[in-house]
Structures are given as structure tokens and as C-alpha cells.
């Protein structure tokens, strides 16, 4: 390398390598110099192999340098091309912004429509993502199963008795374990917390010992239940919810170990649950749970009947089918081995299906509805863009004449659509943030995991994809209809040309599709609205209009049943004398606010599949009159039904038919343990669990004889608003109630509204989408007819000059408009038939072929189409012929 004769040649080789074109001549010269170098090295005494190796080393170095230079050049060229592309796109964007700014009316309308569409679609995606798509916040949630105890009909769901729960967990070979909670405690305000001499109603859920570790939920502070707290004579502790810890204890980290008083009993705070864990949103939607206690699997709780809700986890490799078969077999074994227990008929389904199963069909329908609305938005704006493109044919032709390529014109048209869509997406995101925030706080709707709804990273990614897709849908037709050459553009820029007629046909097809989709949405909405109305008109079995309830059980447990009877009797005596109160009674449970069930065997009856089960209600005299429950036979409870008198009960018609079919229930007896209870009343059926469910058996027991209740509600029949009764009722019972915890009145109508809230949620959202779709369809019709009138100005002038009347012109325009509407409605009705069949599972009291639900949207669309065509037609009829001919 140091040879002066060789060095210039090497330098020249590197200069050849540095060339950007890398011609083949360089390769030939490199090989020539390498051969020369090899010969010189051999002449100087190097062996042929050594000379060849030295030449190859040099050749490798030169190749490396050439590769580096080639890559550097390519990267530089790529950067230059990308910079040129960015500059070109920037020019297109700036031009699009200037063009849209000149057409401010269209731009504002388009931005609003796109923002509403993207906002609604993103909100619905966030709802579906939060409720259905995101995994449940539990460890290994895919293997969790929900185990319910089915009724005799195989449909109604019950809880498990303690003994059956324990035996099912012990005998199962397909489950890793079973844990549960006391569902009868999950309704509002069954626990009284005393702090500083004041009492507060709280919701406490008793759970089995290892419930939280089983789900993989770890307390934020403290710990879960220890083994010594899971036995009958062990210490008692509670875990606080995050909200209660923050509200009542000011987020004090020293709360662990503190003694608090619950229902008059001191217990220790052992932990605080994390903020992310919301028991109510999953297991009892609409209920805020304040604390958790330990449910003891003891004989004492065994006697309370079916109280435990069970959750299991399949072993790795175990299938849900194997678990179902095994659980059914265990249920039969328990029934044969323990005939005196309540029946155990385990039914196993995936936990995810239990949580989401009731709302999944409704959310899928809403997702499809908002997708349809987005299609209407795209069709509407594509139609308007197509009209703008028709008016800009001369402009496009001039740009072609100045040297613009066809691809550049197409890209420019698409860029305008993307600019519009991007602006609408930014505005739509603000609507989505507001909408999801509102949805997540709607505690009135009993929808699981609603609090998780929000605009997160996946929602932002969805918006990005939706923006691109919407931009393509809006811009592809206008872009493809850009002129291909100067002559065509100039010719097609003339009003009334054949190409404009082609544009009109495309826009007509878009409007027809809008009407068809709007028709489907309206039919689906009509079916669900009529179904919801039928649901609200269902026979309840009681009168909710004038009835309100207030929790009145005192903060401290009364010493004995005699004291309880005296207290509740005195409360009724004092309240019944207040102005505005017609009737008053007390009861442990209200309709749609909780349940507990027992096996209710009739005396002397033999049952093949176990005694029927019934919901248990502990009530006072006048309860049936206060609630408006009809007395079918027998007598009401009275003061004479005391602890010293023979036990009595009332049954509803469903339970009487199950126990003594075809016989008079009055005077018949029910065996409860060792107690013989005589039926003295037959009352009407009452819906207690859901409006859609059939009537179930119910057993009413007088509160004077049965002291087994965890809460007591004062129920009044009044013609006054409940808020006006608060002070008078509290003042009346304050002398005997002591420190009565603060509780709000609840009307029975509020309880009904809460039960019906999921359907109301679907109906409200779907109605909003349908109205939006109807407005867009009306705007599409109006825009199409207006554009057609503007294109036919010269024709209209000629016809009017030849003697055509304004009435004939209006009829002509209206005829074409209604023709388009008819095509769209026919297509929409065909799609609505398919849609209605898919909605069968959401309908109640209405068939999928309900004629009213199909006729009402048909008439509405005809009216809207007529209105959308009438105003442009009326404007056309007022055109002056001379002006029309001159402008044409």
C-alpha cells in the first residue's frame, strides 16, 4: 500500500467508489488495479497466495466502502423524496383548508355532522370496550365460573344453603375452589355504622374467608381475612371500601386496627380495598358497597336458607361441560343424602357470560346502530362532496391545463375529505370525553362495569382508524369523478351536462341508502320502544304510585322479640296519625330490592324433586292494604297474631298452586323446621325480582311472630311527596327510635325505574341514533333535490315559458323525491325484517313482525321525504322564466 506507484491507483479506486452512479466501469477498473497490485506484490517476492490474500483484503475494503456509500446515498434520496412528499402533502392540505374556508357554510355543517358521528361512535366503542371487551379485573378470569342454584323450572336462579355450598366445594374434582358472598346483604343500607354518636346506613357484603385472594384482589392497606377470623368464636374484622375510607376516615392510613361499631357490635378494621376494585359494579350494578365482612360457614347461617352466591374456578384443562355434568351429579347426591336441606340444582356458566350475558345483545344492537349512523354520515357528506366536485369541474380542468397530474387531482379531493374528517374527529373526541364521563357516572342504570367506560388508548386508536376510513368513504367517489382531461373537464363544467346527470344518479343512490338505513333504525327503535312500554304496563300485583318506604330499624339491636314488636307497633301507631298518610305498615324487604328463599313443604305432601321454594317476606298487619296487594281469600294479619298465638302465614296464588293444586289453601299448614304454620290468607301474585320474570311463590309471615329480619322498612300510602314527610315522620318516632340512622325515602316507582333501567338505557340511546339518522336522511333528500333544481334551472325556465304551471313543477319534483324515498323504504323494510328477527331476545310483549312498529317508520319517512322535497320544489316554482333562461 505504501508503494508510490500503487498509491495513486488506490486513491483513484476510492474516488470511483465514491461515485453516486456506481457504474460497471468502476468494477472493471477495480479488478484491473487489483490484478496489477497482485502482480507487483509477486514481483517483490510475495508468494502467489499471499499476494492474492492482500489483493482480496483490499477488494473487501473497497466493497465495504462502496456499500456504505450506496446506503448513505439511498438514505439521502429517501429523505429527499419524503421531504418532497411532505411538502406536496402540505401544499394539498393548505389548498384544502383555503378551499374549505371559502365554503364556510358547507365546512361548518360537515364538521358538525362528522363530529357528532365520530363522537357517538367513539362513545359507543368505549362503552362496548369497557363493558364487554376488556378482561374482568380478576386473576385468571377466563377460568372463573358462576354457579347458581336453579329452581324447579330450570330457569329461576337461587343461592345455595351453607351445607350444600360446603359439600359442593369439597366434592368437586373439576374446580380449583369455590368462594362466595351473601347476596341477601347486597341491597342498600343494611348495615349501621356508628361514628361519634351519629349513625349512617351502609351497604356491607359478607364474603367467604378466601374470597378476595381467590379473585386475586389485594387490599390497598392491611390484609384480607385471617384463618382465626373465619371460625365461629374468632375475632371479627371488616374491610373498608376505598370510597368509605376516603369519605368517613379522611384517607387515614392509621385506620388499620381501629375499632368501629357496626349494628351495635365493635369490630376491627383489617384492611382497605383498592380504588380500582368496585364490587357493586360487577356483582350488583347500581349499588355502592361500603364494606366487607366475613361470612361464616356455620350451622347458624345454615338455618338462614339459600343465602350464598357461588363462584368457582376450573382446574387447568377442565372444561365447562365437565364441570356442569359433575355439578349436576353432586346436586343429586346431596338431595338424596340430605333430604331435609333445601334443594341443590347447580347450574354452571362462564363468569364472563353471567356478567355480560344480559347486556351483550343490547350493546351489540347499539354498536350496530351507531355504525349505521356513521354510514349515513359518510353517505351524506359524500353526496355533498360530489355536488361540490361537479361545481368545480372547470377549476379541475384549468389545473390539468397548467400541468397537474390526474393522480394529484384525486389526491387533492381525498385530502379535502381527510382534512374535514380530521377536524371533525378532534371535535368528536371532546363529545366522546363528555359522553363517556356521563355514562360512567350513571348509577341509575344497572349495567355492570359501567364505571370503567372512558376514552383510553384503544379508543384513541379506534378514532384514528375511524377517521381514515370515514375520510375514504367521504372522498373516494368525488375523487374518482374528477375530470381525466382538460376537454372533458371544460365540457362537464357546463351546467346540465351528461356527467352532472351521472353525479346526480350517484347522489340519488346515496340518498336511497340513507333512507334504507334510517328505516331499519326506526323500525328497530319502534320495536324496542313498544316493548319497553309493554314492560312498564305489566301487571305488578301492587300499586306503586302512592307508596314510599323509609328504613326505620334502629342503630342498635333490640334486646328481644318482645322489644322489637313493641317498637314497630309504636312506630305504626305514631305514623298512622300523621296528616297525609292513609295507610302504614312495616316489612323487611321491598319489591325489586333483594330476596331470600326457603323450601316450603306443605304438611303431609310428598315431592318428587323436593319441596317448592318461595321468597320470604316478613310483614306487619295492613301491609297488603298499604301496598295495594289484593286479598283473594282469608284474612289479613292482625294484632292477635302474637308470639303466643299459633303461627300463621299468607301465601300468594303461585305458591298455593304449587303446594296444593286445585285445593283451597286456607287452613292448610306449612312445616318450617319443627313449626307448623297455618295459612290464613291467599293474596295476589307480586313481581319481586324483575318485570320480565313470571310470578314466583311467596310466603308472608307476620313480623310479630317471626323476628328473622335484617332490616325493616316503614311503608306508607300517601298523597304527599315523600320529601314533605321526612321531618314529620322523624319527629314522630324520634322519642322511641333513639339514634335513628339517616335514610332517604324511596318510592316504589323508583325501584321499578331502576329495574327497568337497562332497557331504558338501550331505548334512549337507540332513539337518539334513530332521530339523528332521520335528520341526516331529511338533509340528504333536501340537498339532493336542491342540487337537482339548481342543475335544471334552464329546463325549468323553458318549461315555465312554454306554459307549465307552478303546481305541475311542484308535482314533478315531489314525484321524483317520493320515488327515491319509496325505493329506500322498500329496501329498508326488507332489512328491517332481518333486524327484527335478531331483536327477538330483547322484545317483551311485542312480536318481531309487529305491524305498528313497521307502519309508523314508513309513514314518518314518507312525511320527511315529502318535506325534504317540497321546499326546494316550491322554490323552483317561483323562479322567473326570464331569469332562469338568462342564468342557464
Image: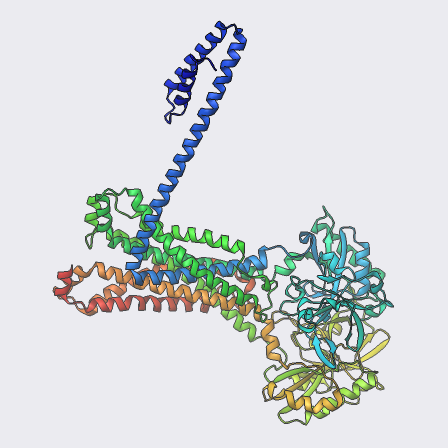
**322 left or right of 383 in image:** right
Residue at x-position 70% and y-position 63%: 273
Viewer can see residue 821: no
Up/down of 215 relative to 656, above or below:
above
Quarter where residue 338 is shown: bottom right
Q: Position of residue 445 (x, y in %)?
A: 58, 69
The residue nearer to you, when weighing 72 against 265, is 72
Q: Quadrant of the C terminus?
A: bottom left
Q: Position of residue 480 (x, y in %)?
A: 31, 47
The residue nearer to you, when weighing 455 against 831, is 455
**317 left or right of 436 in image:** right
Q: Position of residue 751 (x, y in %)?
A: 62, 76
Viewer can see residue 479: yes
**574 left or right of 449 in image:** right
Q: Position of residue 398 (x, y in %)?
A: 21, 47
Quarter where residue 23 is shown: top left
User: How many numbered circles does the render carry?
Assistant: 0
Quarter where residue 192 is shown: bottom right
**634 left or right of 64 in image:** right
Up/down of 423 relative to 695, above or below:
above
Residue at x-position 68% and y-position 81%: 742
Amino acid at each position: 500500500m505504501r508503494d508510490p506507484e500503487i498509491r495513486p491507483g488506490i486513491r483513484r479506486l476510492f474516488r470511483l467508489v465514491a461515485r453516486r452512479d456506481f457504474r460497471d466501469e468502476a468494477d472493471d477498473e477495480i479488478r484491473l488495479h487489483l490484478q496489477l497490485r497482485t502482480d507487483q506484490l509477486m514481483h517483490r517476492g510475495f508468494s502467489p497466495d499471499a499476494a492474492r490474500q492482500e489483493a482480496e483484503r483490499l477488494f473487501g475494503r473497497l466493497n465495504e466502502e462502496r456499500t456504505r456509500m450506496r446506503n448513505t446515498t439511498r438514505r439521502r434520496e429517501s429523505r429527499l423524496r419524503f421531504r418532497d412528499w411532505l411538502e406536496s402533502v402540505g401544499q394539498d392540505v393548505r389548498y384544502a383548508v383555503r378551499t374549505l374556508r371559502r365554503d364556510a357554510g358547507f365546512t361548518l355543517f360537515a364538521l358538525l355532522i362528522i363530529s357528532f358521528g365520530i363522537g357517538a361512535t367513539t362513545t359507543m366503542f368505549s362503552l362496548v370496550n369497557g363493558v364487554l371487551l376488556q378482561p374482568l379485573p380478576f386473576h385468571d378470569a377466563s377460568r372463573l365460573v358462576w354457579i347458581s342454584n336453579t329452581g324447579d323450572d330450570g330457569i329461576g336462579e337461587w343461592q345455595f344453603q351453607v351445607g350444600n355450598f360446603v359439600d359442593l366445594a369439597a366434592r368437586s374434582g373439576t374446580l380449583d375452589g369455590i368462594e362466595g358472598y351473601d347476596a341477601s346483604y347486597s341491597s342498600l343500607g343494611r348495615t349501621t355504622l356508628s361514628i361519634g354518636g351519629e349513625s349512617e346506613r351502609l351497604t356491607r357484603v359478607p364474603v367467604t374467608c378466601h374470597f378476595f385472594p381467590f379473585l386475586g384482589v389485594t387490599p390497598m392497606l392491611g390484609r384480607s381475612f385471617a384463618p382465626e377470623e373465619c371460625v365461629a368464636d374468632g375475632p371479627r374484622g371488616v374491610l373498608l371500601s376505598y370510597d368509605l375510607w376516603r369519605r368517613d376516615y379522611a384517607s387515614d392510613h392509621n385506620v388499620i386496627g381501629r375499632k368501629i361499631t357496626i349494628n351495635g357490635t365493635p369490630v376491627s378494621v383489617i384492611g382497605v380495598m383498592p380504588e380500582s376494585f368496585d364490587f357493586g359494579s360487577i356483582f350488583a350494578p347500581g349499588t355502592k358497597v361500603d364494606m366487607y365482612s366475613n361470612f361464616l360457614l356455620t350451622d347458624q347461617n345454615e338455618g338462614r336458607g339459600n343465602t350464598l352466591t357461588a363462584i368457582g374456578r376450573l382446574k387447568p384443562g377442565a372444561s365447562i361441560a365437565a364441570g356442569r355434568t359433575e355439578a349436576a351429579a353432586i346436586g343429586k347426591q346431596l338431595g338424596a343424602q340430605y333430604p331435609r336441606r333445601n334443594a341443590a340444582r347447580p347450574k354452571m356458566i362462564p363468569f364472563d357470560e353471567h356478567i355480560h350475558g344480559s347486556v351483550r345483545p343490547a350493546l351489540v344492537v347499539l354498536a350496530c346502530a351507531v355504525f349505521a349512523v356513521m354510514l349515513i354520515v359518510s353517505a351524506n357528506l359524500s353526496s355533498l362532496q360530489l355536488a361540490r366536485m361537479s361545481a368545480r369541474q372547470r377549476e379541475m380542468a384549468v389545473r390539468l391545463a397548467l400541468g397537474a397530474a390526474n393522480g394529484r387531482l384525486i389526491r387533492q379531493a381525498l385530502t379535502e375529505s381527510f382534512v374535514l374528517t380530521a377536524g371533525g374527529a378532534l371535535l368528536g373526541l371532546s363529545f366522546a370525553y363528555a359522553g363517556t364521563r356521563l355514562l360512567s357516572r350513571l348509577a341509575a342504570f344497572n349495567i355492570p362495569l359501567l364505571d370503567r367506560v372512558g376514552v383510553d388508548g384503544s379508543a384513541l386508536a379506534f378514532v384514528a382508524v375511524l377517521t381514515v376510513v370515514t375520510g375514504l368513504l367521504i372522498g373516494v367517489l368525488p375523487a374518482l369523478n374528477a375530470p381525466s382531461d382538460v376537454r372533458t373537464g371544460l365540457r362537464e363544467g357546463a351546467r346540465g351536462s351528461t356527467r352532472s346527470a351521472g353525479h346526480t344518479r350517484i347522489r340519488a343512490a346515496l340518498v336511497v341508502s340513507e333512507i334504507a338505513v334510517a328505516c331499519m333504525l326506526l323500525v328497530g327503535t319502534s320495536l324496542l320502544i313498544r316493548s319497553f312500554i309493554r314492560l312498564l304496563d305489566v301487571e305488578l300485583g301492587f300499586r306503586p304510585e302512592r307508596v314510599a318506604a323509609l328504613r326505620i330499624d334502629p342503630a342498635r339491636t333490640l334486646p328481644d322479640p318482645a322489644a322489637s314488636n313493641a317498637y314497630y307497633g309504636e312506630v305504626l301507631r305514631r305514623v298512622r296519625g300523621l296528616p297525609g298518610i292513609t295507610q302504614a305498615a312495616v316489612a323487611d324487604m321491598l319489591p325489586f330490592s333483594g330476596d331470600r328463599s326457603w323450601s316450603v313443604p306443605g304438611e303431609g305432601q310428598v315431592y318428587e324433586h323436593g319441596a317448592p321454594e318461595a321468597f320470604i317476606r316478613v310483614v306487619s298487619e295492613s301491609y297488603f292494604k298499604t301496598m295495594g296487594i289484593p286479598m283473594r281469600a282469608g284474612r289479613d294479619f292482625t294484632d292477635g297474631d302474637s308470639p303466643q298465638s299459633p303461627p300463621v302465614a299468607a301465601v300468594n296464588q303461585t305458591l298455593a298452586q304449587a303446594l296444593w293444586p286445585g285445593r283451597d289453601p286456607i287452613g292448610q299448614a306449612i312445616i318450617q323446621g319443627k313449626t307448623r304454620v297455618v295459612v290464613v290468607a291467599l293474596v295476589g301474585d307480586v313481581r319481586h325480582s324483575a318485570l320480565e320474570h313470571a310470578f314466583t311463590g311467596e310466603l308472608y309471615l307476620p313480623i310479630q311472630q317471626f323476628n328473622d329480619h335484617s332490616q325493616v322498612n316503614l311503608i306508607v300510602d300517601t298523597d304527599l311527596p315523600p320529601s314533605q314527610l321526612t321531618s314529620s315522620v322523624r319527629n314522630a318516632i324520634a322519642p322511641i327510635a333513639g339514634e335513628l340512622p339517616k335514610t332517604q325515602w324511596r318510592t316504589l316507582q323508583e325501584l321499578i325505574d331502576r329495574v327497568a333501567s337497562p332497557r331504558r338505557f338501550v331505548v334512549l340511546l337507540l332513539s337518539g341514533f334513530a332521530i339523528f339518522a332521520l335528520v341526516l336522511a331529511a338533509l340528504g333528500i333536501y340537498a339532493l333535490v336542491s342540487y337537482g333544481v339548481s342543475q335544471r334551472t334552464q329546463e325549468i325556465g323553458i318549461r315555465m315559458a312554454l306554459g307549465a304551471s307552478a303546481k305541475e313543477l311542484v308535482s314533478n319534483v315531489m314525484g321524483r323525491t317520493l320515488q327515491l324515498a319509496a325505493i329506500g323504504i322498500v329496501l329498508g323494510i326488507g332489512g328491517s325484517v332481518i333486524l327484527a328477527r335478531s331483536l327477538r331476545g330483547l322484545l317483551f310483549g311485542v312480536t318481531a313482525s309487529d305491524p305498528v312498529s313497521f307502519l309508523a317508520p314508513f309513514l314518518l319517512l314518507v312525511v320527511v321525504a315529502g318535506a325534504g322535497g317540497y321546499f326546494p320544489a316550491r322554490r323552483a316554482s317561483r323562479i322567473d322564466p326570464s331569469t332562469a333562461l338568462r342564468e342557464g
